[in-house]
Amino acid sequence: MKILVMSDSHGRSDLVQKCIAQHPDAEAVLFLGDVLIDMKGMDKKFPDKQFYCVRGNCDYDTEVPLERLVTLQGTGILLTHGHAHSVYYGLNTLIACARKNGAKIALFGHTHVPYNQYHDGIYVLNPGSLSRPRDCSRPSYGMIEITPKGILTNTSDFNQFLM
């Protein structure tokens, strides 16, 4: 199963739509917040995909949860924007939360900087930002592939699709 991971689009629903369209083989789309309105109608435009979202620190007046645990292909995945876990100051709280909830993958956004590491049994991925990258990074998103042989995670440069 291929899973597309995005975060921090900040009003660029056009980029969200373009990113989803570039990955017809992705069966699920995970959005990690900031700005949720960018996801509005994507389930109608791409009815063959599963959509899961959490809200970020810039998402107001919504009942979408701050954190969510989903199971895809038998694999627990923790979704959070990251601000509630103080990800600017380290990932220990996030990793502990994933472990406590039985997740094999912990996803976060908020920093606008791509991150992809394996921490003692937990895959930790930040897809970066589609529209407002920081720290000399480029617009980016993440991909997860869950196979019978294991889990693959990576971040991808979005610039190639902006042309």
Image (cartoon, grey):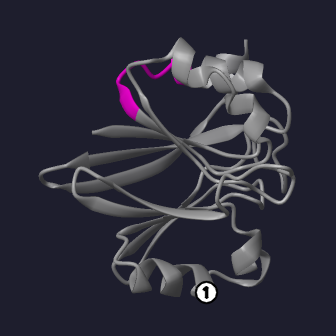
Q: Is residue 156 above or below residue 124?
A: above
Q: Where is residue 123 in the image (x, y as percent from the top left)?
A: 42, 67
In the picture, measured across the screen, residue 65 lies left or right of residue 110, that is left
Q: Where is residue 158 in the image (x, y as percent from the top left)?
A: 65, 30
Q: In this view, does 91 lie above or below 130?
A: below
Q: Which residue is drawn at 35% across and 23% down?
A: 25
**What residue does disc 1 label?**
93
In the picture, measured across the screen, residue 80 lies left or right of residue 37, that is left
- Residue 93 occupies quadrant: bottom right
Depth order, front residue of 138/7:
7
Is residue 160 in sight in this rendering? no
Q: Residue at x 35, y 69 (%)?
A: 104
In the picture, measured across the screen, residue 81 lies left or right of residue 104, that is right
Helix, strand, or loop for circle 1?
helix
Q: Which residue is drawn at 60% across and 65% down?
A: 67
Which residues are drawn in magenta?
20-27
Mark 1 packing: few (<14 Cα in 10 Å), some, or many (20+)? some
In the picture, measured across the screen, residue 33 lies left or right of residue 141, that is right
Q: Residue at x 22, y 57 (%)?
A: 74
Q: Where is residue 77 in the image (x, y as percent from the top left)?
A: 41, 61
Q: Where is residue 162 in the image (x, y as percent from the top left)?
A: 72, 18
On whether residue 136 falls in the magenta region, the answer is no
On whether residue 21 falls in the magenta region, the answer is yes
| Quadrant of the drawing holding the C terminus | top right
Q: Residue type at mark 1? A: Thr
